[in-house]
Image: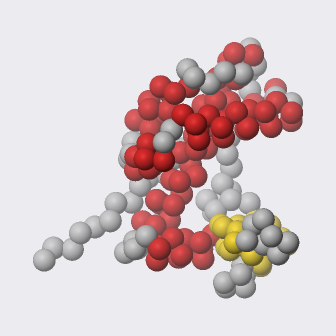
């Protein structure tokens, strides 16, 4: 029987969301991984987030858990698929930021006040959750070509009002 290779999704290129040089995001000097004990970690997950004692999980352990939970054969494939869960939403957020900038006649994101950014983030989060079903989001996350993802996201932008 021929061994089937798992699909490794390419990274989404983002303009505004900084994942850091290692692709894992910024580290938190006060965070310690609940599973492996590493310090100064890029937080990959939080357990009991709404309790008085949230438990932080480093990105590496979060990927290992994701790999196990979703039965990925390789850590690389699990990491790529897990990254997509976040990055498609970030991409939609960036498209909303660009729409806002254009509508307000602003040139760059640096022209935004902190209050504007907060409002845009809330609008973006609500729009993503209200304009796409869970099934649509999963389909978007599994599209390989970023341009095709952008085309599908763009169709929903007309419903976003500021």
The residue at the point 51 percent across, 38 percent down is: 132
Q: Please, is residue 26 above or below residue 86 in the view? A: below
In this view of the protein, which residue sits in the foreground, 155 or 91? Answer: 155
Q: Please, is residue 151 above or below residue 135 in the view? A: above
Tell me where residue 34 appears, x and y as whole percent: 71, 81
Q: Residue furthest bottom?
A: 36
Tell me where residue 8 appears, x and y as whole percent: 39, 60
In this view of the protein, which residue sits in the foreground, 9 or 51? Answer: 51
Is residue 113 found left or right of 39 in the rendered image? right
In this view of the protein, which residue sits in the foreground, 108 or 126? Answer: 126
Q: Please, is residue 35 above or below residue 29 in the view? A: below
The residue at the point 54 percent across, 57 percent down is: 83
Quarter that holds the C terminus: top right
Q: Quadrant of residue 45?
A: bottom right
> Which colour style is shown?
secondary structure
In this view of the protein, which residue sits in the foreground, 45 or 20? Answer: 45
The residue at the point 62 percent across, 24 percent down is: 160
Whether residue 50 is visible to the viewer of this picture, yes or no, is yes
Picture mark count: 0
Q: Please, is residue 59 above or below residue 80 in the view? A: below
Q: Quadrant of residue 122?
A: top right
Tell me where residue 5 appears, x and y as whole percent: 28, 67
Is residue 106 found left or right of 52 in the rendered image? left
Quarter that holds the N terminus: bottom left
Whether residue 76 is visible to the viewer of this picture, yes or no, is no
Q: Residue furthest left?
A: 1
Tell me where residue 49 appears, x and y as whole percent: 75, 66
The residue at the point 51 percent across, 61 percent down is: 82
């Amino acid at each position: 029987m021929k061994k089937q290779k798992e699909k490794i999704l390419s990274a989404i290129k983002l303009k505004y969301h900084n994942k850091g040089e290692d692709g894992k995001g910024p580290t938190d000097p006060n965070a310690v991984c609940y599973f492996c004990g590493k310090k100064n970690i890029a937080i990959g997950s939080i357990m009991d987030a709404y309790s008085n004692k949230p438990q932080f999980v480093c990105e590496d352990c979060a990927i290992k858990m994701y790999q196990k939970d979703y039965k990925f054969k390789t850590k690389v494939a699990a990491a790529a698929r897990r990254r997509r869960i976040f990055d498609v939403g970030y991409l939609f957020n960036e498209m909303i930021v660009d729409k806002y900038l254009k509508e307000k006649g602003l040139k760059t994101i640096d022209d935004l006040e902190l209050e504007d950014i907060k409002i845009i983030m809330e609008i973006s989060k609500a729009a993503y959750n209200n304009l796409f079903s869970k099934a649509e989001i999963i389909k978007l996350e599994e599209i390989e070509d970023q341009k095709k993802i952008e085309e599908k996201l763009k169709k929903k932008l007309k419903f976003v009002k500021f």
